Structure formats: structure tokens, C-alpha cells
């Protein structure tokens, strides 16, 4: 019966995917031009739309010790879920404080009491992560399980991860008890709702009020908002939570008790030294105006985009800016590329090099040099003041 149910869910998702081809990233819809870079953050928020988030996996953690176990394994506070929140964004860290995976943790509702909002007993939580780091996270959880009364299970085949946004998305917050897990995505303004649900559940929830679009449009929205997510942004074994803005996205609780990898995160926070952060950026071909035009280019394809972790090169600074003079003697690359969507991208960049006074470059997949034009998101809690 379980196998038959999973097969039916996959067939339903495939039908929904094929029916959404007319709603994919049309060129006329995405030829966006703005006056200020931060205007990109709301450029795709005007319509009621939803998409399946690409490359996501789901791990179920259940049992009487599930909440306590997860409290000690990740950097946010599980009490937020106990106090009525549907879920939270967080990060799982290695003992040295580097990322294993960014994640969402949801409390799973019971299959027979979704209408009343009841939760499963014993407690069960769904951990949503990038598909590419699922096995690594499962091994990490198994390693620390010891005698905890929990059960770990790969539930990826049972669920899809969905994002719903637009003017009417807030109203859906009153009705998502029909799905197994959900939360209001507060990583940045306008991100909407995030749901873990079967294809049947999501289709019944959004009905005819929301149009389905391709997952690439979701990726473009979060890139333009400056929201890091997944293995291309949170590089396993290398990324530091604060450099990936996990603190700005409400994914780190600095007052909770001990958890794996806590020392580096807390020390970095209290020292106030975060020299690099992930920021949104535009890519433009060398000689096409040097990044002056704030516009999305629908013709910019993946064959031109730089691969994640491609180095960014420092080129020039304005000669009349003496405060930037030390940056001209950089010994290391000032940044690395992360996720790209059309000619929009996320990049890990030194904060003192974010601005019109500096020219940055990278190399696309086709070997062509590209100008990188980064900016600071408007939703950051304060203007960054790095210590150089």
C-alpha cells in the first residue's frame, strides 16, 4: 500500500509538472529593469504563484526524544516550534563550526487530524535539506543518535517542497492545516509560505487562486532577494553560518544551550567580525556596459553562468577613495560565486568591496569574463560595518 501511494504521488507530481510548462520563465515576463538594485527584491512579488522548490529532500525524525535530539544538533531553538510556529530555518554544523547543511525543521501533523491542526504523537519532525547533502546529514544524525529514542527515516519520496507567494499568500496561513508541514518563510520580506506536502495536498490548497510556475522562478526570486539556500550557497565543510546570513534570516539563536559546532558561531558573533557575506549580484558580459544597466537578461543561459565556487577577481578601485586603497593588495580572491539564475547571482564577497567604487570580475562556464555587480539587500538588519 505504501509503495502504491508513493507511485501515485509521483505520477501526480509529473502531471502537475507537465501542466506548468506554459507558466515557466517566459522572456517577456522576466525582462526586468529597475532604478535601484534593491528594487529587484519585490520585482516578482506582484502575482499569486507557487512552485515546487528544486533539489530538496525530507528526513523524518520521530520519537519521544526527537525534540531534545534536534535541539542539540542545530543552531536554532526548537522552543519556537513548541510555542506554535509551524517550523523554522536553521543549520546543522560540524564540530568545527562549518556547515553540514542549511535546513528547515517542521513539526509534522498527524495524517488523520490535519483539519484540527493536531500534531503527531510521539512527536515527529520533518527536516528539509538540499538533496545533495541529504546522505551526509543522515550519517551525521545517525552518528550522534547514540541511545536517543528516535527514528530517522528518508521521507523524500513521500513529499514535495513548495513555495507559495503573492498578495494572497498571507491568507493561506489560516488554512494550511490541510498539509503535513508548513511555515511562514521569514528569511526575507515577500518570501511567502513554504510547505511540505504531497501534490494532491498542494493542489487542493492553492486551488485556482495561484498559478503554478517553474522552480527556476522560485530560485530567481530568492536570488534577487539575497536569500542563500542549498549546497551551492552553504558549501558543506567550508561555509560559516554568519557568512551565509543565517543569523540575518532568523536561523541562529544566540541564547540557546550547547549544540554541535556552537563555539565558532558564538565567538564570531560576539567578536563582531564578519568580513564576508553572501550578497546578490548582477552578471554582465565584459564590454556590455560594465554592469551599469540594472536589468535581468532572459537570454543569459546556464552555459554562460559561472559555476558555484568560481573565484571572483578584484580588478580596480576608484583612485579618489583612499579608504579602499588597502584592498588593492589582496592576497586571496575577494569572493566566490554561488547560485546563479539568469544573469542574477549570489556571491560570497568581502563587504568592503560591495559598492560602485570597485570592479569585480569572474569567469563564466564558456570562459568569457563577466563583470560582477553586487549590492547589499535592503532587509539586512543594519548596514554592515566590517573590521578591515
Image: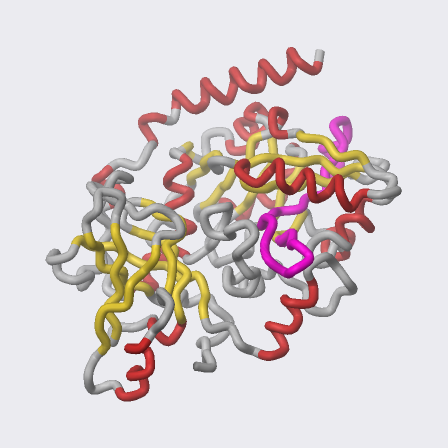
Using the image, determine if residue 370 lies above or below residue 28: below
Q: Residue at x 39, y 21 (%)?
A: 18
Residue numbers of the magenta segment? 90-118
Using the image, determine if residue 123 lies above or below residue 223: above
Describe residue 301's horizontal placement relative to residue 80 as left or right: left
Q: Position of residue 296 (x, y in %)?
A: 24, 50
Residue 110 sits inside the magenta stretch: yes
Q: Position of residue 156 (x, y in %)?
A: 61, 29
Q: Quadrant of residue 26?
A: top left
Q: Nearer the viewer, residue 370 or 28?
A: 370
Q: Nearer the viewer, residue 283 or 199?
A: 283
Q: Can residue 108 be seen?
A: yes
Describe residue 342's horizontal placement relative to residue 91 as left or right: left
Quadrant where the C terminus lies?
bottom left
Q: Residue at x 37, y 59 (%)?
A: 280
Describe residue 322's horizontal placement relative to residue 247 as left or right: left
Amino acid at each position: 500500500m505504501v509503495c502504491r501511494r508513493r507511485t501515485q504521488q509521483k505520477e501526480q507530481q509529473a502531471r502537475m509538472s507537465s501542466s506548468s510548462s506554459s507558466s515557466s520563465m517566459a522572456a517577456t515576463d522576466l525582462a526586468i529593469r529597475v532604478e535601484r538594485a534593491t528594487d529587484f527584491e519585490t520585482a516578482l512579488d506582484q502575482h499569486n504563484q507557487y512552485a515546487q522548490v528544486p533539489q530538496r529532500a525530507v528526513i523524518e525524525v520521530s520519537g519521544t526524544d526527537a525534540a531534545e535530539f534536534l535541539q542539540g544538533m542545530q543552531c536554532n531553538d526548537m522552543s519556537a516550534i513548541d510555542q506554535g510556529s509551524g517550523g523554522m530555518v536553521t543549520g546543522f554544523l560540524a564540530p568545527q563550526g562549518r556547515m553540514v547543511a542549511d535546513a528547515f525543521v517542521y513539526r509534522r501533523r498527524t495524517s488523520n487530524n490535519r483539519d484540527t491542526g493536531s500534531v503527531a504523537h510521539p512527536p515527529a519532525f520533518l527536516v528539509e535539506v538540499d538533496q545533495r547533502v541529504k546522505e551526509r546529514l543522515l550519517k551525521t544524525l545517525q552518528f550522534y543518535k547514540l541511545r536517543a529514542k528516535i527514528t530517522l527515516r528518508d521521507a523524500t519520496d513521500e513529499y514535495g517542497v513548495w513555495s507559495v507567494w503573492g498578495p494572497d499568500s498571507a491568507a493561506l496561513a489560516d488554512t494550511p492545516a490541510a498539509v503535513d508541514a508548513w511555515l511562514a518563510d521569514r528569511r526575507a520580506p515577500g518570501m511567502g509560505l513554504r510547505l511540505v506536502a504531497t501534490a494532491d495536498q498542494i493542489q487542493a490548497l492553492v486551488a485556482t487562486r495561484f498559478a503554478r510556475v517553474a522552480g527556476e522562478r522560485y530560485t530567481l526570486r530568492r536570488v534577487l532577494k539575497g536569500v542563500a539556500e542549498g549546497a551551492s550557497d552553504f558549501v558543506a565543510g567550508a561555509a560559516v553560518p554568519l557568512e551565509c546570513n543565517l543569523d540575518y534570516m532568523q536561523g541562529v539563536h544566540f541564547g540557546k544551550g550547547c549544540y554541535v559546532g556552537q563555539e565558532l558561531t558564538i565567538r564570531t558573533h560576539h567578536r563582531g567580525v564578519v568580513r564576508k557575506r553572501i550578497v546578490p549580484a548582477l552578471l554582465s558580459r565584459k564590454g556590455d556596459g560594465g554592469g551599469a544597466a540594472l536589468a535581468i537578461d532572459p537570454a543569459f543561459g546556464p552555459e554562460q553562468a559561472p559555476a558555484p565556487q568560481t573565484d571572483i577577481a578584484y580588478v580596480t578601485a576608484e583612485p579618489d577613495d583612499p579608504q579602499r586603497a588597502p584592498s588593492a593588495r589582496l592576497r586571496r580572491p575577494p569572493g566566490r560565486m554561488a547560485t546563479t539564475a539568469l544573469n542574477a547571482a549570489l556571491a560570497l564577497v568581502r563587504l568592503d568591496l560591495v559598492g560602485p567604487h570597485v570592479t569585480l570580475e569572474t569567469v563564466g562556464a564558456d570562459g568569457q569574463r563577466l563583470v560582477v555587480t553586487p549590492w547589499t539587500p535592503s532587509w539586512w538588519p543594519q548596514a554592515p560595518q566590517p573590521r578591515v
